[in-house]
Image (cartoon, rainbow, N blue to C red):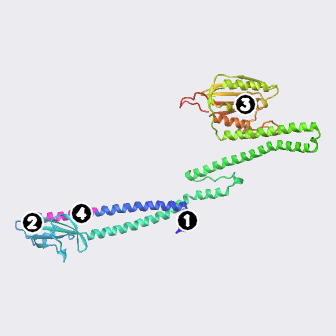
Amino acid sequence: MKRFRDYIDGSIGLRLTLYYCAILLTTLVLCGFVVIFGMNFALTKEANSKIRVAILNVQNTLQNEENPNLSDPELVDQAGSLELWIQVYKNGEIINKSPNFGNIKIPYYDGPVKPILINGQEVLVSGKDIGDGVFVEVAHPLKREKHFLAVLSGLLIFLMMGATLFAMVSGYISVTNTLGPLAILTRKVKEINTGKLDERIPLSGPKDELYLLAQAFNEMLERLEKGFKSQQEFVAAASHDLRTPLAVIKSYNDLLKRWGKDDKKILEESIQTISGATQRMERLVNDLLFLARVESKPRINFVKLNIKELIEEIGKEAQALSQNISVTFNSCDLFVNADEDYLRRALWALVDNAIKYNKENGEVKIISRQEGNFAVIDIIDSGIGIKEDVLPRLFEKFYRVDSSRQSAGFGLGLALSKEIIQLHGGDIRVTSRYKEGSKFSIYLPIYPPAIKGKNATL
């Protein structure tokens, strides 16, 4: 029994087949009960009608004759069929009865039709006083009706069992064929591992639920493949950026062990270099921690913020730090709902990139404007520009256009900016022409929020 239960639990096709067969059998049994009950009601009603008609016929015959012969056999023969037992009383004595009575005796009964048992057989009986001391009693044995209902019940049971068996076999075959792609999907899933994320489930057949399941699984595999590759690139990039300062620290540590103790120049150089490498690692770890915090969707301290004031502050800081790059800003009063610290960091990362990757005596412009229900901040530079084929990867963590990795950053600034802006319900768009310059546009929902149904869409 346990093995059979385990087999059922391990096969969804068999479970579905048994469930539907149980539903079918229950439906057929209910229908069978309705049919038997209906036939029994109809046959009983017909027998009642025959009894009443037989009594009425005897009454009419006696009333139509001047001197009726109560003992005439034709009186009971004409009144009913061979199924009926009819007997006529005169002053309480039986003077005529149907020849099919045999030795059966019906108890005297005066009243409407009712069922009684005679010799273990169910009989419907009714009697009526028709005047002048004449009493007619009619009985209808239900033997034929009961036999018919028994045969009908057996036939229905046979049909139910046959239909259920046929439904079970055909249903199991149908369900097995239908769930065949699911077995293929299961086998394919077991074969796929981190080394085979490029494999896909073959899509074929009608676009039913199983097709959509396979399609969704393929889409999930595609996301996993991208995520796994991104993770590998992330680990490789982080390892590279950490290995370089660690190598510097190690080499200068070895240098100090050999000659640095007695040579003040080497000691000073080593201390400064190790300090710089340590600061670089600290900055990288802080950026990683900040990125992780932003990606975890932290609670933001939203306040009403005038981006004009923020742009002016960042613009002045950029003017002070840029040497041979011209930084100009032109902003208007636009209010957004934002966390000032987060938004400042996102905007500064874009401005810092615009300065860092600019040309000699280049120019950076910071402009604010309104576009629909969004406040837009444009950071425009006249720098080296970005090739079109790398634009889709521009906001990936640790991705840098400079493949030689000689730039000072870690490739996290744009990723952080993107996460922060999206956390504020906005977006960043970029357009660029290689060797001519780039334009980064920050879109933020304007404050107060637009009326529902009239929001601009990004």
Q: What amino acid type should be assigned to the residue bearing mark 2?
A: Leu
Marks 2/4: CA distance? Answer: 25 Å
387 shown above or below 116: above
Q: Magenta residues: mostly which secondary structure?
A: helix
Q: Mark 1 or mark 3: which is in front? A: 3
449 shown above or below 2: above
Marks 2/3: CA distance? Answer: 121 Å
Q: Earlier in the sequence, mark 2 or mark 3?
A: 2
Q: Which mark is residue 268?
A: none
Secondary-structure class at tag 3: helix
Q: What amino acid type should be assigned to the residue bearing mark 4?
A: Glu
Q: Mark 1 or mark 2: which is in front? A: 1
268 shown above or below 25: above
Q: Which mark is residue 62?
A: 2
Q: Which mark is residue 46?
A: 4
The residue depicted at 16 percent of the width and 73 percent of the height is: 98
Q: Characterize the local packing of mark 1: few (<14), some (14-19) or many (20 or more) Cα atoms within 10 angstroms.
A: few
Marks 1/2: CA distance? Answer: 78 Å
Q: Is residue 25 left or right of residue 429?
A: left
